[in-house]
Amino acid sequence: MAWQDVEHNWTERKMKVRAKWTRLSNDDLDFIAGSRDKLISKIQQHYVRGRDEAEVELNSWLANRHH
């Protein structure tokens, strides 16, 4: 799945994001509002990850969502 699909369908996709990153609150999801950079930032914040590690995790999730 491409990030554009997530971004353009955020209302539908945000629950799948929340299922993967359960520490994200509804307020976090509202703040993210489909922004890849904001999601990476929140993953870093809630999971104590570096930016590169958070990006790899997000890219892996996106790749696996396609199947």
Image: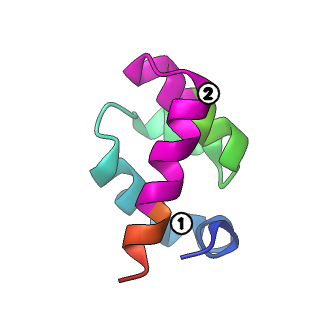
Can residue 31 be seen by looking at this rendering? no
Bin the neighbour count of mark 2 within 10 Å (Cα to Cα): few under 14, some 14-19, many 20 and up: some
Q: Is there CB contact under 8 Å for labels 2 and 1?
A: no
Give the mark, 2 or 1, whose residue is nearer the N terminus: 1
Residue in view at x 36 percent, y 61 percent:
16
* Quadrant where the image shows the C terminus: bottom left
Report which residue position mark 1 lands on.
Answer: 11
Please report the residue visible at 48 percent of the width from the left and 31 percent of the height from the top. 43
Towards the viewer: 40 or 22:
40
Q: Position of residue 44 (x, y in %)?
A: 52, 24
What type of secondary structure mainly makes up the magenta span?
helix
- Left or right, 14 with respect to 50, comes to left
- What residue does disc 2 label? 51
Q: Give the image location of residue 55, x and y in percent.
A: 58, 42
Residue mark closest to the camera, 2 vs 1: 2
Position of 1 relative to 38 (above/below): below
Under circle 1, the secondary element is: helix
> Which kind of residue does numbered mark 1 sit on?
Thr
Residue 36 appears in the figure: yes
- State yes or no: residue 40 in magenta: no
Q: Is residue 45 magenta?
A: yes
- Residue nearest the viewer, comparing 35 with 1: 1
Which residue ends up furthest to the bottom in the rendered image? 67
Residue drawn at the location 28% of the way across and 53% of the way down: 19
Highlighted range, magenta = 42-61
| Looking at the image, residue 39 lies above or below residue 62 | above
The residues bearing labels 2 and 1 have C-alpha atoms spaced at a distance of: 25 Å
- Quarter of the figure with residue 42: top right
Where does the image place residue 56, in percent across and percent down from the top left? 52, 45
Secondary structure under tag 2 reads helix
